[in-house]
Image: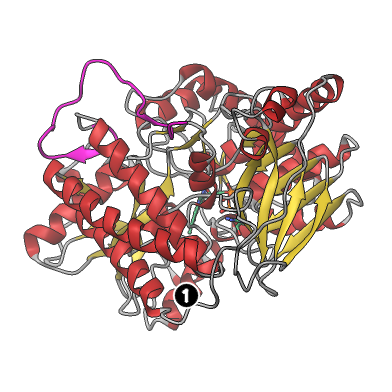
Amino acid sequence: MRTPAASSSSSSSNAGLASPARAYDVLVIGSGIAGLSFALKVAREGRSVAILTKKTKADSNTNWAQGGIAVVTAETDDFAKHVADTLTAGDGLCDRKVVKQIITDGPERVRELIELGLKFSRAEDGHYDLGREGGHSERRILHVKDMTGKAIEDALIKAIGREPRVALFEHFFAIDIITTGRIAGRRSKRAASTGPDRAAGVYALDVRDGRVATFRAPVVMLSSGGAGQVYLYTTNPDIATGDGIAMAYRAGVEVRNMEFIQFHPTALYSISGKRFLVSEAVRGEGAILRNCDGDAFMPRYHKLADLAPRDIVARAIDAEMKRTGAPHVWLDITHRNAAFLRSRFPAIYKFCKAEGIDIANDMIPVVPAAHYTCGGVATTLAAETTLPGLYACGEVACTGLHGANRLASNSLLEAVVMAHRGAASVDAYLKRIQKTDAKTPVIPEWRDLGGGDLDERVVISHNWDELRRTMWDYVSIQRTTKRLERARTRIATLARETQEYYWNFAVDARLLELRNLIQVAELVVACALQRKESRGLHSIADHPKKLARAVDTSVRRAG
Ligand SMILES: Cc1cc2nc3c(=O)[nH]c(=O)nc-3n(C[C@H](O)[C@H](O)[C@H](O)COP(=O)(O)OP(=O)(O)OC[C@H]3O[C@@H](n4cnc5c(N)ncnc54)[C@H](O)[C@@H]3O)c2cc1C
């Protein structure tokens, strides 16, 4: 954070371009399922809430979720089975207590979504049309056709719109978390009166006018989603640049298990480089993966064949592509008729059709792409991070639910459950903090030391590309220590160069995202190098075995 120490001799053209501070009880970073659900709950407790979101309110991973939300509703299903499936996918690293809690909380949270107006798809007999996805022993995925995320996002945005205590700021990019310790100066006399370090707000760039605003609040909820954009190929939309993880790390907060990046096995292979997701639910309805020779190869890799856990399917596809030299494999659902496919998968059907693929007659070319960030900001079951007043929920967080690999459709579940649990614990924190003597020091306005607009913008776009390609080539599905070390060296050079720009030029969203992506890349590599075994999503050739004891990797910035 460069503001508090800004010297009075600053010659910045941005100096003075700070907006007046705004004060709330609670700040929420992000408007996906996690942030909106949380905001709704705390506002209903009577708290004033500001939601900051860096693009428009619906720009989120949530809006793209297709398959649905995993939750126990069927009579044939039970919590123990869902817990067992989650633990199996997590490959020994899940926190059993967290898994049990999140899964048992699920039905109640889903009922609340239904109360908001969400209409999950039903079969002809009137029961929910439960989908099946890889790693699940039962059909338990509630969905709204293949547009579940959009339906959830729409319902939550409508509910937030009716809530007078919530102010939603679109195009406000959170830059860094303000902590009492940082602004007081840890060793100063003032620091003694402010008590232990805690969150006090955020600096955020108003993307449309270039000013940096100060938002004050004793509680900051990070719900800024994952970091898929750190890889060249990803199913994630552009917003997924790991900003919350990078911000938390810079604030000295513990980040965990960043090596576990889930690659979705079946993203549409398109020349444009964009990777549209072809949901696992398509395999749940019988689609078969074939290599370029037409062989159905999955039975050679796992007993569940095409419904094996995602990491196994992604590695199998990667291996088949490397073995045959083909740029993709095929997904074959041509045995289902067009009417069924149009009705069950309208978005996929339409997207493929626009790409010239009629999925009822043609096989779909697919490749793996970075999809989900299993690690993140370490939290308790109350969504607390290691910094008092800073909370995290949704994909940005690492609760212990996913362990070494996320079970399909468990992430929407985790987000909505943890938003609820976070809201409950925030209330107690706010009451506690109001009673203490600890003062919040005056927060200085943002001062930019930069010397003007960036004229060499090509450096930013070049570094974006280089970073993402480095991660794709050296830190993706199959790893080696040598490749990870090579990546670390390259990322360090990009970090130095980008940091220099950050200090010397006026900030903009693209530069801030690059800075965060580089930070996230460093964390992924650091965690991957810590783990001297292959477990779950982390497969490393020089440590092919799993160690007897499963331990989280952890990184935290010193002092
Ligand atoms: C294509 C696709 C399909 C998926 N399908 C499923 C599925 O079927 N089932 C399932 O369980 N999961 C699925 N997932 C995963 C799931 O969608 C996400 O894990 C979940 O939606 C994350 O929700 P969230 O609220 O944590 O983050 P998001 O929904 O990603 O929201 C993050 C928000 O934070 C904002 N933000 C980020 N940085 C900043 C910043 N610096 N300042 C201000 N705002 C910021 C973003 O703009 C956004 O509003 C899918 C993901 C993708 C990409």
Q: Position of residue 243 (x, y in %)?
A: 52, 52
User: Is residue 553 found inside the magenta-colored segment of the image?
Assistant: yes
Q: Is residue 444 above or below residue 541?
A: below
Residue annotated with mark 1? 351
* Residue at 38 percent of width and 67 percent of height: 275
Q: Is 522 inside the magenta-drawn segment?
A: no
Q: Is residue 366 left or right of residue 240?
A: left
Q: Considering depth in this image, is 157 or 399 the residue closer to the camera?
A: 399
Is residue 219 left or right of 137 when viewed as pictured?
right
Q: Nearer the viewer, residue 346 or 318?
A: 318
At mark 1, the secondary structure is helix
| In the depicted structure, whether residue 327 falls above or below residue 5 | below
The reply, left or right, for residue 143 in relation to residue 245 is right
Residue 279 occupies quadrant: bottom left
* Relative depth, front residue between 136 and 504: 504
Residue at 69% across, 31% down? 389
**Residue 207, image x and y in percent?**
65, 70
> Where in the figure is residue 205, as x and y percent of width and height?
65, 63
What type is the residue that disc 1 sits on? Answer: Phe
Figure colour scheme: secondary structure
The number of numbered badges drawn on the structure is: 1
Residue drawn at x 85%, y 25% is 434
Residue 495 lies, with reference to residue 558, above or below; the image says: below
State the residue in front, 400 or 25. 25
Q: Which residues are magenta?
A: 535-559
